[in-house]
Image (cartoon, rainbow, N blue to C red):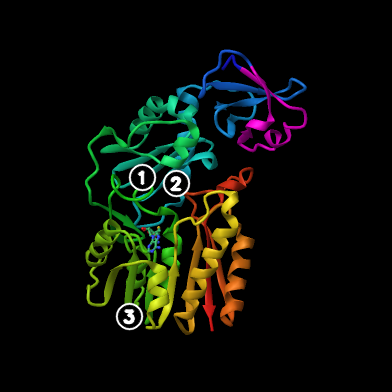
Amino acid sequence: MSSIRCLLKPGKEKPVLAHHPWIFSGALDQIDDGYKPGDLVQVYSSSEEMLGLGFLNPDSQIAVRMLTFGAAEIDESFFRARIRKSLELRKQFVPAGTNSYRLIHSESDFLPGLTVDLYGDYLSVQIHAIGMERWKDVILKILQEEIPLKGIYEKMDAEWRKIEGLKGKPGLLWGAEPPDELEILENGLKFLVDIKHGQKTGFFLDQRENRKLVGEHSRGKKLLNCFSYSAGFSVYGARGGALSTVSVDSSDTALNLASKNLTLNGFSEKDHRCLHTDVFQYLRQGNEPFDFIVLDPPAFCQSKAHVDNASRAYKDVNMIAMKRLSEGGLLFTASCSSFISVDLFQKILFGAAKDTGKNIRILAKTGHPFDHPVNIYFPEGEYLKGFLCRVE
Ligand code: SAH
């Protein structure tokens, strides 16, 4: 167990007692001398009660990321037990015809600062806590021993790593380099994933069940997939019997995979177009109506300070999408900003409906799937909101 102790200010033990995994820097009263960022610390309340162990990083706003609430030996077997727990959960819930999903979802799998996605025989790993970085070799060893793999690649979220004071470059950590076009399976559909150059860890695994939902309601419809990335929603729509799909994205690399993904699943380029353009411009300038529109923008809001601006952007894009829908059309609209709560997102949609004079009925409210679980003590981990609406 760590010998470094940190003491909380009076009254600041409450969230820790409620198993919240973050302690903000303002809650710390004192830390023993001689610590380094990334050290394991024992956390004590102001009345000297030992509350648990965590990774210390006084240079970050999140000064401690809790690993345990109580005493424990933090060693290889500790991490192995946690990783096995994550794998067991996935084994129980992974849908048929799927070989790619999130294996470790950071704080929500009790492994703060560690994200691991499985793509067939390859892992895409992200570390965004300096304490977890110290355990990287141990984590890699466990992953290799617990999962049959060909290679492990490290991706880096520059923003998160900067906050934690972490440097380094993305690259191969172990085994073979993943191919640039790795074929994966999701709900029986094939997708090419470029782990090395793709966005995030390579694919937006968190939208898997939402893509399925959209596919199930696409029959006979003209589908517009805005912010399509590699055409995930379009491929599901096409399988679900959409008359045609249009995938719109501003990234060439994403669209290159998008058209390949459509043909890989047997859908012709004639009926399933991919357009390299700005979504806002495309929605505003055209007048061809669609029966189903998917809006899955990147996070417009990266911090609390941006909530107002982001709300306006979400309202704007939803309004222009609503106007492009045929009477009684469907809208699947998502937000992946954790700072935009589900209630706020619904208010934004209310504003967009009112200003366009549309009637909106919510048919389903969705989130992220089982491999992105939400730890009840860590509501910040819930970030994805999706609304399926009928617009008339
Ligand atoms: N729906 C996708 C994931 C979308 S990620 C899936 O299921 O896989 C968001 C995408 O929006 C990225 O591919 C990014 O390139 C694209 N993007 C961001 N801003 C854009 C804009 N203004 N116009 C078009 N595409 C944009």
Q: Amino acid at mark 2?
A: Arg
Residue 381 horizontal/vertical position (percent):
56, 47
Q: Amino acid at mark 1?
A: Leu
Q: Please give the range of residues in magenta.
A: 5-31
Between disc 3 and disc 1, the foreground one is: 3
The image's mark for residue 90 is 2
- Is residue 110 shown to the viewer in this render? yes
Indicate whether 337 appears above or below 130.
Answer: below
Q: Nearer the viewer, residue 137 or 359?
A: 359
Do the CB atoms of the residues marked 2 and 3 lie less than 8 Å apart? no
The image's mark for residue 118 is 1
Q: Nearer the viewer, residue 357 or 258?
A: 357
- Is residue 217 shown to the viewer in this render? no
Distance of label 1 from label 2 (alpha carbons): 11 Å
- Residue that badge 3 annotates: 243
Q: Nearer the viewer, residue 221 or 146?
A: 221
Does label 2 or label 3 sit earlier along the sequence?
2
Residue 46 horizontal/vertical position (percent):
75, 23
Is 371 left or right of 122, judged from the image as shown? right
Residue 218 horizontal/vertical position (percent):
40, 76
Do the CB atoms of the residues marked 3 and 1 lie less than 8 Å apart? no
